[in-house]
Image (tube, rainbow, N blue to C red):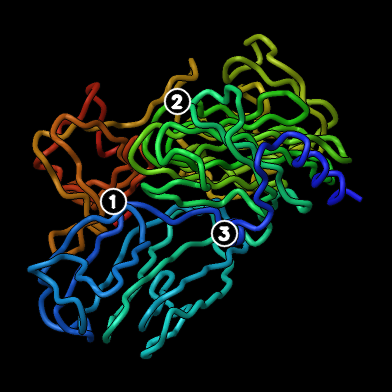
Amino acid sequence: MRRIFLALLALAVALPMTLGGPAVSPVQADTGSSWTGEYFTNRYLSGTAYLVRLDNAISFVWGGDSPAPGIIPADNFSVRWTGPQYFAGGAYTFTVTADDGVRVFVDDALLIDGWRDQVATTFTASANLSAGQHWIRVEYYEAADQASINFSWRLSSAQTAPGGWAAEYYNNTNLQPPQAGGRLESNIEYNWGGGSPLAGINADNFSVRWWGFPTFEGGTYTFVAAADDGVRIYVDNVLVLDGWAPGSYREIRATAEITPGTHTVRVEYFELGDQARISVYWTRSGALPPGSSGGVTATIATGLLNVRSGPSASNSVVTSVPQGTTYAVTGRLADNSWIEISGNGFTGWVNARYVTLSGNLSGVTVKNSSGASAAVQVQSNASLRIRRGPGTQYNRVAAFARGAVATVIGRTADSTWLQIRTSDGVEGWVSANFVTVLGGKAVNSVPVTG
């Protein structure tokens, strides 16, 4: 019945309706970022890489061309991509499609093995991952003719509207009539690149509104939208996720309490110029924002617990939370006696004696008695390489620009190398000789992690 209703709604709101349209891939959570790509002029990943560069995603259709004309041949080449990627924790499904050979490693363990000559072939595999960063390695080779690879992963529990979505397309960036096209779509998972999403729709300066009517079990849900440019999500006309601003591809997360039953979910998106891409899904009880708590949660273990504005009983009450509810941990005192938690519409402090913690609390930001961050921060004095480990022998993870600031999350015993977390969640190591410690804080207070 819901499919019939969706079809009627789509026909009612659309102008020319294309029911078929291009195939839509399953909902996918992430493609990662800041991949170090090492390109070789042979198909065996042997010798010295002729080209090393940062790739935002492992998603290429080279066809019969070279990935780097004049440097890498169009045939008989190979690539190794590596990078630390953030996972919220749980069961993940990894998907890779390649022509020709491909293999995927998670924390140096082989997960997918498709190392053979083949036309574009899709492989999937599942893995249970703890919350935090994991080292991902993708290896690929091209033999001859066509060359392509696409790699991504999703939470196995990721959900979207089971009845599909009624999509409205507009040839402007603000969803203003007249509607220029419409169709039914199974998922909101697109990477249009520089092309048009639909016949009659601009390649740039367009917007889309999707309507879905999913049934929720009830509870706390994390909504995830990744987009280039703007995106926002409404549930029953209540804004639950707001990323309505121009920007390159990035992931935005927001939590909301949803009652059991069928709800109206509305997703809105706009594209300005250059690349166009969007992915939307949600999960129940779990996925936490990258960098916010390292996946640590606190479950209330007493009747009705007061959440306070600061880490002491003398601070004012922000709200009260019932027993059995679970929240992200976003801060702590150094002695772990008080924990900062974040829920739908509030952030505040609770006494740690009255919660049950899940995850490694040592990775959560230490804050002082006023609730302000007590973390040690450093500023780069030069353009540095952030490396996988504490030494120049480790691969580059990302760049640390001159003047950039990052939080120190670990160090070597002699404090000559510092493990940092940047503002966009990248973790890695830099030499202490090329950074300045801010605020007069002592690096020696940071735990030894390498």
Residue lying furthest right in this view?
1
Label 3 – label 1 distance at C-alpha? 40 Å
- Residue 142 position in % (x across, y down): 28, 81
How busy is the neighbourhood of tag 2: few (under 14 within 10 Å), some, or many (20 plus)? some
Q: Which residue is mark 2?
A: 245
Where is residue 344 shown, x and y percent of the image?
A: 68, 27
Q: Residues within 10 Å of mark 3 (few under 14, many from 20)?
A: few
Q: Quadrant of residue 49?
A: bottom left
- Residue 97 x, y percent position in the rendering: 45, 73
Q: Which tag is nearer the camera, tag 2 or tag 3? A: 3
Answer left or right for 162 relative to 85: right
Q: Which residue is mark 1?
A: 428
**Residue at disc 2, secondary structure:** loop
Tally of numbered discs: 3
Q: Which mark is nearer the camera, 2 or 1? A: 2
Query: Horizontal and vertical percent for residue 80?
Result: 27, 72
Residue 247 lies, with reference to residue 47, above or below; the image says above
> In this image, 80 relative to 86: left or right?
left
